[in-house]
Image: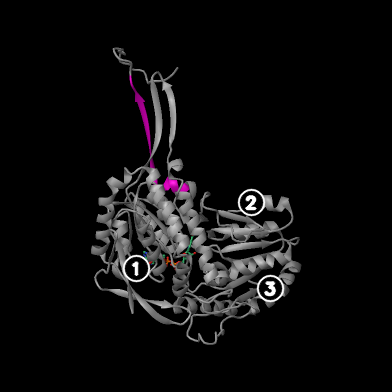
Amino acid sequence: MSHIPHLINGERVAGNGRSAPVYNPSTGDSTSAVGLADRATMQLAIDAAKAAFPAWRNTPPAKRAQIMFRFKQLLEQNENEIAALISAEHGKTLEDAIGELKRGIENVEFACAAPEILKGEYSRNVGPNIDAWTDLQPIGVVAGITPFNFPAMVPLWMYPLAIVCGNCFILKPSERDPSSTLFIAELAQQAGLPKGVLNVVNGDKSVYDAVDALIEAPEVKALSFVGSTPIAEYIYSEGTKRGKRVQALGGAKNHAVLMPDADLDNAVSALMGAAYGSCGERCMAISVAVCVGDQIADALVEKIVPQIQALKIGAGTQCGLDMGPLVTAAARDKVKGYINAGVAQGAKLVVDGRDLVVPGNENGYFVGGTLFDRVTPEMTIYTDEIFGPVLCIVRVGSLEEAMQLINDHEYGNGTCIFTRDGEAARLFCDEIEVGMVGVNVPLPVPVSYHSFGGWKRSLFGDLHAYGPDGVRFYTRKKAITQRWPARKSHEAAQFAFPSNG
Ligand code: NAD
């Protein structure tokens, strides 16, 4: 069985021999073992990043950007290999894996603009012979902790930008699907990153404290986290307590509102992809359809049921499928547990994916597309993030009621409205308490030159991820005011506060 190592100071490092199995979720087979870092291994990465920082922070941004250009090229050249690695450990379809990679590459493209991004601001003659400018300086050693569901894209939200801003990075990826993440980091190395600028340390919190080592290390100045809400809250509170900059993106429950005038055929296609794509394991997945009126709800059920029943489900490593398995046996059991709870709590189970068996892949972690109707807000299938292929229909009487429902939910990551009514769409965009909003767009994931972030318990911290907010997060502003008095001139001491008045 192959061993997945760490990448520290530009070298593969095996660690201390302790490891966890990694599975192919389509077959249930354990395919490799990932090294789990202890504190000593994590310290090697922290030391490497710290040692690389002085030279890297003084490397011209244009040179840093050139590495990103080469990195982008390498990612594109290796697209199929990366997609295969993602599918083999995550289970998502190859097409979906390529989609995630392309959205990750967008962030590398944004990072290629480093010289422009880091220009700062300049003002000449703010006072007599005085010029002032604002510099964007790197923070130092920064770290990222990423989830299993986007092993390529989410790390690429973080380190290309952090690195072109002049920081050195330690990435702690998910221990469930680490191969593509490591492969991509090695491509960044191949593109020309100096040793120690990017380090990847595998590990988990519960066993060997890899995450706590990052939180506690005084050398680590900022932490970016993406994952579930309880861990986001933990990392935010423990990190900020120690004076670190933290941005922690958490879980979600994303609602799509269907207005009576929605273009139903297009809304159904959009819902199918957004609810069942990647087996529902997306933080922007639509898991609740809020239907305004019984008529649109009945029409939705009639149109969507045959499409759910026709979903092509199989091993993620094949082409031409709609959906693969869930990531682990535990994830499958959790999703089935929620479906059982929905039935017990009185929701109407319209399509039941619990008994799906994929011929030839009987041991894979599959759950079929599932649909509940007449879901009410106190049911756990409504309150909790299921993170599986389960869509819940909630029926309401008006747009105001739909918006109140969404605003009352603890999460506020993404949402969308399907309508032909501009006034309704405008009200929705203005008043909904959610960070990312789509109008007839089911997965409103911002492009790399905007920033990504939810509201409420979907994000802890002040800044969103990547894009302009990412630059703010990974840099510190320094305002410099400079005077070069004319030779032989002398100014008397001034005791009043200096002004242009
Ligand atoms: P997770 O919270 O279990 O794990 C995320 C990371 O934290 C992993 O690297 C993991 O090893 C580490 N971790 C796990 N337990 C920890 C602990 N006790 N202390 C410290 N670190 C710990 O999340 P996941 O299951 O990998 O990913 C799914 C979750 O991520 C979902 O809730 C999903 O909504 C969320 N997510 C959010 C976004 C977003 O942008 N808001 C994006 C992707 C995923």
Residue 483 highlighted magenta (yes or no):
yes
Label 1: which residue?
A: 204
Q: Position of residue 309 (x, y in %)?
A: 65, 79
- Given this view, does label 2 or label 1 mark the residue nearer the observer? 1
Q: Residue at x 29, y 56 (%)?
A: 216
> Can residue 464 be seen in the rendering of this structure?
no
First reached walking from the N terminus: tag 2 or tag 3: 3
Q: Quadrant of the C terminus?
A: top left
Q: How far, Cα to Cα, is label 2 from label 3?
A: 26 Å
Report the disc number at residue 391: none
Q: How many marks?
A: 3
Provide the residue designation for mark 3: 304
**Residue 26 drawn at (x, y percent):** 48, 79
Mark 1 close to ligand 1, CB under 8 Å:
yes
Which segment is the magenta one?
A: 469-484
Identify the residue at horizontal 50%, vertical 55% (top origin): 106
**In the rendered view, would you say 118 is above or below 230?**
above
Q: Which mark is residue 429?
A: 2
Question: For residue 238, which quarter of the picture?
Answer: bottom left
Task: Residue at 49% x, 49% y: name it.
Answer: 467
